[in-house]
Structures are given as structure tokens and as C-alpha cells.
């Protein structure tokens, strides 16, 4: 063990779904105390807290959590990175531990979204009485809907269709089959917002949101929180054997943003920054895609999952359609993808997602995933992407202890 | 004839409607929005560049749920205009996957989107099938 290594000591996600009786802080504290208990530590042990809550307003969520869970005076970082907010919070905690500033770090992501409708984006003001130019395009009225779309289902539909244009084979039915896979996986996940198996006919016949994404092919807005406690390798060595046995090694923790390319300001390019993050992560961890026993990737829409098979290099470049058709990403396949049910079934409480994906992987690496356990899982990858854009990739390994 | 204004500043009207991008003189990157600098090379010198009015449909979606006031369904698309990517709606064809196909040739067209209280007409652009 090198002293710079960082481990997940405790991690938990709440049930995702509707929590009418619980507010944002209830959910955040539930996840926080569950993660601390899972790691056998308390708030007093933490040297840093990083937390995110994207849609909840301007209040500093980290300090709000401290004011319920324990005001110990430690540095608090409030992070905001779209759908990569949770992964960013974890990354901040990891950096602090890696830098030797803290022995233990806490990362929390929480969101209250149930009833918010589809992850739409594209809010717009009403048109004025007389044309007046505003904004960076000098538009006389909102451009969303008049010059393309800003809605998330539409943007990610175009991202999937662009892949189809480049490599062929990606059509409505194929994207719906990806969704069918994830809804099938979700039946084994008691914490998923939706855990109902859906047939291909049901998925394709459901309400069209933005072709080719129908409603069940879109991530479900819901309430939820997730929290993780990280620890330095040297500190972990002083803890109990049980804590060491359940600790999960963070073999790679990477965050990238989107580098400039032609068209990237016309349609967000979620490909290059994911490929860059994956490349760096594989190098840092010293593992390759073939070593992965499971992958949780950011299937905010069925059209997104396809492109990330390729971006994470789970298949040859251009080979995502064949990869899916081979059965590889099914739970009994060679590279199980989204055995949690993915965001389409599990739900997508934005700031919680980047930690919940890591919890899912840890759950399997610890051998604690019950009926949905991927047998013998030793290495896993968790990926999230937030538009505008940020990509988090973490590679996790079963503890050798 | 009513006074007409372009919907966005990067649309030029007249007998030969076309889009004009800000082209970085350092690296050639093109942008449609007001710039502080170039996202590719950080240069600050730009020149206007006419964008081709012919293109190929590189991606699209058919949006069924949109902001209030936007007619649905509509086709949102990314058009490759001879190397410059443009975001626009596909118009003058039914909004369904039988009539909108990846790789199909399209051309720029303009149309009024309404008049303000002083009778000034705003003209937007879109792309229509060119075949
Ligand atoms: Zn430049």
C-alpha cells in the first residue's frame, strides 16, 4: 500500500423515489449517517466535507448538513458540476486525503426532484411586445425550440443519433432494447425508483418525448441521496480487520471537462471528455476495459448509454451496436453495464447520482449485493457526465485485505 | 412591405440569406455567439465568415415536449454545412422519421416567426430537404 492510496471506507445510497415526508436535509443526513456507520466512524473523524445539491437553491448544502449532523469546524466545500456533482464532491474529498490534509473525508450528494417532470432544461421567458435583442446570439426571442432544442431528452437523442450517423446500426429499436435491458436489471434492485420489467413493445409504444427517446428511455427524476467516507491507506491500516476487509480501493479518480472541437458548442460533445477520463483512469489504475467485472455508466437517456460503451472503450471504436447485440452489457454478459437498472429505472437525483453509481459498484465488490450480485466481482468502473460538461470516472477494486 | 429583422444576429437576410460566423483568425475555429476569445486557441481576433447554405443532416431528434409557445412536434437537427456545424430546425417536411433521414442533403431557408407591436417582422432560419 502506498501512502497516497485512497479507499472508500463507508458508502450508502438512500432509496431513490418519492420521499414526500423527507426534505433535502433529511435525505442528506440519512445518507451521511448511513455512510459513517457503514465505515465505523463518526462526524468527529472527518477532516473535510464536500457536498452538492444542484436544484435546491443557493444555500451551502455542506454547512446545512453540518448543522444537522455535526458542526466540527472542518473545511466545507460546496460543489456544483451538473450531473457530475456527486462525483465531483467525492473527487474533492479524495484530493484532500491524497494531499495529506485529511485522514478521512466525507462526500454527500442530495436532490429532491420527484414531480419535477422530465429532465427538460430549456426554460424560457415569454416573448416580449417588441423585438429586442438579448443574449450571446443577439436573438429577439428565446432560441430554444426555434433554433434546435435545449431540452435534455432532445440533446441526448441527437448525441445517440449522431453515433448512428457515423457508424450505422443505431435505430429506435436498438435504443429501446438498451432501455429494456436496464429495466430488466432493475427488478433486482430494491432501492430503484422503478423496478418493473418492461417489454420492448411497451417501451417503444410509450409516450414519445424526443425521438428516439420515449418516456421509459429517459432518466427518472426522483428524490435521493448518497454519501461516501474516504480514508487514506495509512489510516486504514490502523483500523479493524473488518474495516480493512470491506474497504474498497479507489484505483482511479478522474474528472475531465470537454476540450474544444469543431461543433462542440453546437451540440455538446460528451464523447471526447469521457474517452479522455477513461484513458486516464485505466492508466492510473493499471487496468484495462477487459478487466472490468461491472460498469455503472451515465445512461441519462437510452441514446447516451450506447455512445458510452464506445467512449469507455468497452468495445472497439465504432463497435457499440455490435457490443450491445453480443449481449456483453447484460448482467450475464462479459461486461455487465448498469446492473442497478441505470438512471432510466433506478432514477437520477442529479447530485446524488455520481456517488450512488460508486455505491453500486462497491456493493458488488464487497460481495453484498444479494440477488443481483455479480459473482466474484473484483474491479468495477463508475462513470457520470454532467452537461456543459464534466465527466467523472472512478475505478474501484476489491480490497486485498 | 413590413420591416424585417433577422431572428439572430448571425443570420443575414436579403436576396441571398446566409449565416455569418465569427472565425478566429488564429486557428480558424468558428462561433455563432458573441465572443470574449476563441475557445480553441484563446485568440481574440475574429473575422466574419460566410457559412455554406447547403449541408448534410448529421443528427436530429423529433421533439414532442417543448417550452410553452413552441409548436410540437418539431425536428431539431445538427447540419454539417461544408465543415461548419449548425444547429437548426428542419422545416417544410413532416416531422417524422420517414421524412427526416440521417445523411440527407438540406438547404437553408428563411421564414417569418411573427411581428411585434410595431409591425416589425422577425425572420428565422431553418433547413429544408434539398433533394
Ligand atoms: Zn482560435
Image: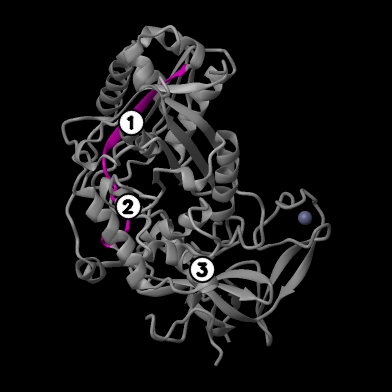
The image's mark for residue A219 is: 2
Residue at x 67%, y 78% (from the top left corner):
B18
State whether residue A27 appears in this view. Answer: yes
Location of the N terminus of chain B by quadrant is bottom right
Residue A362 picture location, percent across and down: 35, 32
| Relative side of A377 to B117, left or right | left
Which range is magenta?
A215-231
Residue A93 picture location, percent across and down: 49, 23
Q: Are the residues at dot 2 and dot 1 in contact (C-beta closer than 8 Å)?
A: no
State whether residue A144 appears in this view. Answer: no
Q: Earlier in the sequence, mark 3 or mark 1?
A: 3
Location of the C terminus of chain B by quadrant is bottom right
Q: Are the residues at dot 2 and dot 3 in contact (C-beta closer than 8 Å)?
A: no
Q: Earlier in the sequence, mark 2 or mark 3?
A: 3
Instruction: Name the image quarter holding residue A11.
Output: top left
Residue at image mark 1: A226
Q: Earlier in the sequence, mark 2 or mark 1?
A: 2
Which secondary structure lies at badge 2? loop
Residue at image mark 3: A162
Residue at x 42%, y 12% (from the top left corner):
A46
Q: Are the residues at dot 3 and dot 1 in contact (C-beta closer than 8 Å)?
A: no
Task: Give the CA separation, mark 3 to mark 1.
Answer: 33 Å
Q: Chain of mark 1?
A: A
Amino acid at each position: 500500500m502506498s501512502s497516497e492510496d485512497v479507499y472508500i471506507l463507508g458508502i450508502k445510497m438512500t432509496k431513490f423515489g418519492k420521499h414526500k415526508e423527507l426534505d433535502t436535509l433529511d435525505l442528506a443526513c440519512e445518507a451521511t449517517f448511513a455512510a459513517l456507520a457503514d465505515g465505523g466512524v463518526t462526524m468527529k473523524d472527518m477532516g473535510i466535507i464536500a457536498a452538492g445539491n444542484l436544484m435546491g437553491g443557493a444555500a451551502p448544502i455542506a454547512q446545512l448538513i453540518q448543522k444537522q449532523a455535526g458542526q466540527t469546524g472542518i473545511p466545507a466545500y460546496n460543489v456544483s458540476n451538473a450531473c457530475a456533482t456527486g462525483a465531483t464532491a467525492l473527487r474533492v474529498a479524495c484530493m484532500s486525503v491524497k494531499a495529506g490534509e485529511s485522514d478521512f473525508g466525507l462526500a454527500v450528494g442530495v436532490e429532491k426532484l420527484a414531480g419535477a417532470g422530465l429532465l427538460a432544461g430549456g426554460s424560457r421567458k415569454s416573448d416580449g411586445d417588441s423585438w429586442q435583442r438579448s443574449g450571446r446570439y443577439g436573438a429577439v426571442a428565446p432560441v430554444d425550440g426555434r433554433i434546435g432544442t435545449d431540452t435534455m431528452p432532445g440533446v441526448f437523442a441527437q448525441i445517440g443519433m449522431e453515433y448512428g450517423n457515423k457508424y450505422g446500426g443505431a435505430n429506435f429499436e436498438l435504443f429501446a432494447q438498451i432501455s429494456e435491458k436496464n429495466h430488466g436489471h432493475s427488478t433486482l434492485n430494491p432501492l430503484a425508483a422503478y423496478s418493473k420489467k418492461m417489454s420492448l413493445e411497451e417501451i417503444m409504444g410509450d409516450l414519445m418525448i424526443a425521438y428516439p427517446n420515449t418516456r421509459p428511455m429517459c432518466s427518472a427524476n426522483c428524490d435521493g441521496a448518497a454519501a461516501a467516507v474516504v480514508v487514506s491507506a495509512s489510516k486504514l491500516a490502523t483500523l479493524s480487520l473488518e474495516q480493512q476487509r470491506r474497504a474498497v480501493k479507489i484505483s482511479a479518480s478522474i474528472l475531465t471537462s470537454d476540450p474544444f472541437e469543431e461543433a462542440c458548442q453546437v451540440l455538446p460533445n460528451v464523447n471526447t471528455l469521457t474517452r479522455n477520463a477513461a484513458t486516464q483512469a485505466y492508466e492510473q489504475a493499471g487496468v484495462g476495459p477487459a478487466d472490468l467485472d461491472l460498469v455503472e455508466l451515465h445512461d441519462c437517456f437510452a441514446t447516451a448509454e450506447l455512445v458510452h460503451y464506445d467512449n469507455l472503450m468497452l468495445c472497439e471504436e465504432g463497435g457499440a451496436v455490435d457490443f450491445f447485440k453480443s449481449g456483453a452489457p447484460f448482467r450475464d454478459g462479459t461486461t455487465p453495464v448498469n446492473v442497478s437498472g441505470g438512471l432510466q429505472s433506478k432514477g437520477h437525483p442529479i447530485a446524488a447520482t455520481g456517488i450512488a453509481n460508486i455505491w453500486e459498484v462497491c456493493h458488488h465488490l464487497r460481495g453484498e449485493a444479494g440477488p443481483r450480485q455479480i459473482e466474484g466481482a473484483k474491479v468495477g468502473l463508475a462513470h457520470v457526465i454532467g452537461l456543459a460538461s464534466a465527466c467523472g470516472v472512478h475505478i474501484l477494486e476489491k480490497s486485498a485485505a | 412591405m413590413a420591416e424585417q429583422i433577422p431572428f439572430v444576429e448571425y443570420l443575414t437576410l436579403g436576396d441571398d440569406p446566409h449565416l455569418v460566423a465569427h472565425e478566429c483568425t488564429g486557428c480558424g475555429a468558428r462561433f455563432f455567439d458573441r465572443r470574449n476569445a476563441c475557445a480553441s486557441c484563446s485568440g481574440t481576433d475574429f473575422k466574419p465568415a460566410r457559412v455554406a447554405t447547403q449541408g448534410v443532416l448529421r443528427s436530429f431528434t423529433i421533439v414532442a415536449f417543448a417550452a410553452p409557445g413552441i409548436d410540437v412536434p418539431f425536428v431539431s437537427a445538427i447540419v454539417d454545412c461544408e465543415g461548419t456545424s449548425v444547429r437548426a430546425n428542419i422545416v417544410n417536411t413532416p416531422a417524422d422519421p420517414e421524412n427526416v433521414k440521417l445523411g440527407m442533403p438540406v438547404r437553408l431557408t428563411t421564414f417569418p416567426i411573427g411581428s411585434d407591436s410595431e409591425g416589425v417582422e422577425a425572420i428565422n432560419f431553418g433547413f429544408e430537404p434539398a433533394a
